[in-house]
Amino acid sequence: MNNPILVEVLRSTLVESRHRGAIAVADADGGTVLAIGDVTTPIFPRSAVKALQALPLVETGAADAYGFGDEELALACASHSGELGHVAGVMHMLSKAGLDASALRCGAHWPMAQSAVAALARTGEPSALHNNCSGKHAGFLCVACAKGIDHADYWRPQHPVQREVRAVLENLTGAVLGDDRCAIDGCSVPTWAIPLQNLAYAFAKFATGRGLAPERARAAARLRAACAQKPWHVAGTGRFCTEIMQLFGARVFVKTGAEGVYCGALPEQGFGIAIKCDDGAGRAAQAIMAVIIARFLPLSDAERAALERFVHPTLRNWNGFEIGALRVTAAI
Amino acid sequence: MNNPILVEVLRSTLVESRHRGAIAVADADGGTVLAIGDVTTPIFPRSAVKALQALPLVETGAADAYGFGDEELALACASHSGELGHVAGVMHMLSKAGLDASALRCGAHWPMAQSAVAALARTGEPSALHNNCSGKHAGFLCVACAKGIDHADYWRPQHPVQREVRAVLENLTGAVLGDDRCAIDGCSVPTWAIPLQNLAYAFAKFATGRGLAPERARAAARLRAACAQKPWHVAGTGRFCTEIMQLFGARVFVKTGAEGVYCGALPEQGFGIAIKCDDGAGRAAQAIMAVIIARFLPLSDAERAALERFVHPTLRNWNGFEIGALRVTAAI
């Protein structure tokens, strides 16, 4: 595998670091819109597919049973920063299913947001609620409870909830997710390796509903609408996913995943997007996503100007001096 | 530039991410001991050369004038974690020169150590003292004060202290550091791009004193001894630089730099080491350094066993489950 250099990190005018990767953009018929680098070798999408993992929450009727609105559905799709509103929202989701934080099996970590770390440290220690995946886990628990299934092992690959999630992923991606493709994610649920071209195809279907059963298409539309309405709940203050969806509303869906993954959808164009940086660099995957949006989404001058700082990010040091920049290469 | 893949990141048994890079090991005569990948293109060594930047502190007599011992000298070479002892040590250095934290121009950031973040958040906000480079900056200030030079602009490239640092780097590396090689570091002092082979050569001279003026050779030996005696002051609790030097004492000097750089020295072998990961990944540079140490340093069975977790790092998730590993490739 020899993916091209997609992003260069400049310090002054010299290239300090470089990131390789691959990009797939597809339509809902499986047609290739763009393919750069290796889009056929399975990669772990990690949290970038949380919106697909959340489909059963809507499809099974669990979301309706518990009266969930946009905030709860956005949290189920989120890698949140552990800010107060995120934590409160997840507690609310759990309470609707008659549960509390002790049911979560995602593990605890300090919030992603430094400000949230500082705020939390003044009063306590992080719990599983602060885990960036706690909304997804609350969603899994709600599916189990609404269906009357024992929820204790909801995170294990053989639990009915995870089996259903795997079936949804196979349905959308068209990939066969055998045990040889399965690993354990940071939050302990299964993660399946899937080629970028299949992930892009899945997000084109998620974006349009094409090729999906009516129930699933409706669930996809509802999750997209929830994220567009409540983008802060999908990530948090100052985060790329939040700011992009605040900027473009329902016209763009984007979701980050660990180890340099980004997935996204452009519903009006009918395109799904999947990006993986070889080295796991989120900074590069994010810049690539911004460039892909700029390339395929018709933009007003104001939108183009607002997107500029993501397309051409400047790097500043601890004194706020501009010391360099990220530069997407001609390979894209 | 097409450096080889040096480290693979495994999730379960599949490769999730991969890191390319280059390695130079040299002796003090400039002889090449090992060269993998591109060792001739200049790279920014960043904090990996702090021990070289600290040479004027000893050579000028400033360290003696202020009565500095191993702790202060180790802090001058440090990228510290901002733990209480680091902050107190830097305050002590500044006070000896009649200064306080207001003289520092490195900028403030929250400590690297999550535990230090939490501790600090309970009582205040970060200052420049918590910047991982504050010991280096205190050293620069002490040089200026001991020489009776105005210290206000000590961080600027044209200040006598930074001009002296550049001359020291040119002397040790044998590279000509023109303005076209100069950029601004995270802490606002100049950083000069230098080829890996020259950095390895510099650290071989630092390790042995060979080819250095007697005064400079003595200063190098004193800084190495200080770091070997006080490795916690060079980094902090649980950090690679600290743990490696705790394990091997004066037999190994290692120092991390931002964007995937590691420099080091094996004094008994007379070797200097310089590593750069193309993508800036510290996790990969660290594993490579562990493998290089294991390759060139004669190890007892106990030492080999202690080094094992750095040579073959396992990856654990938020629940502590072993979910993967780093694997150094056959290219090394």
Image: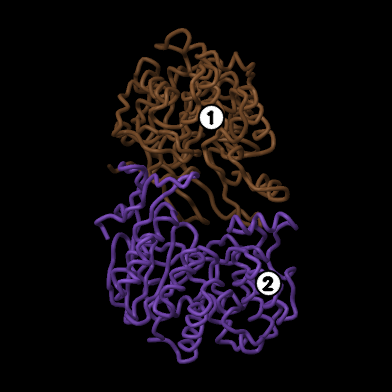
Chain colours: A brown, B purple
* Number of numbered callouts drawn: 2
Residue B120, given in percent of the width and then of the height, sits at: 69, 58
Is B119 left or right of A6, judged from the image as shown? Answer: right
Is B279 left or right of A267, judged from the image as shown? Answer: left
Q: Which residue is mark 1?
A: A136
Name the front one of labels 2 and 1: 1
Question: Can you say whether B184 is above or below A88 in the image?
Answer: below
Whether residue B325 is visible, yes or no, is yes
Furthest-bottom residue in view?
B214
Occupied quadrant, residue A248: top right
**Chain that bears disc 2:** B
Q: Secondary structure at mark 2?
A: helix
Whether residue A301 is visible, yes or no, is no
Q: Quadrant of the C terminus of chain B?
A: bottom left
**Amino acid type, callout 2:** Ala
Furthest-left residue in view?
B330
Q: Which residue is mark 2?
A: B88
Is A153 left or right of B26, judged from the image as shown? Answer: right
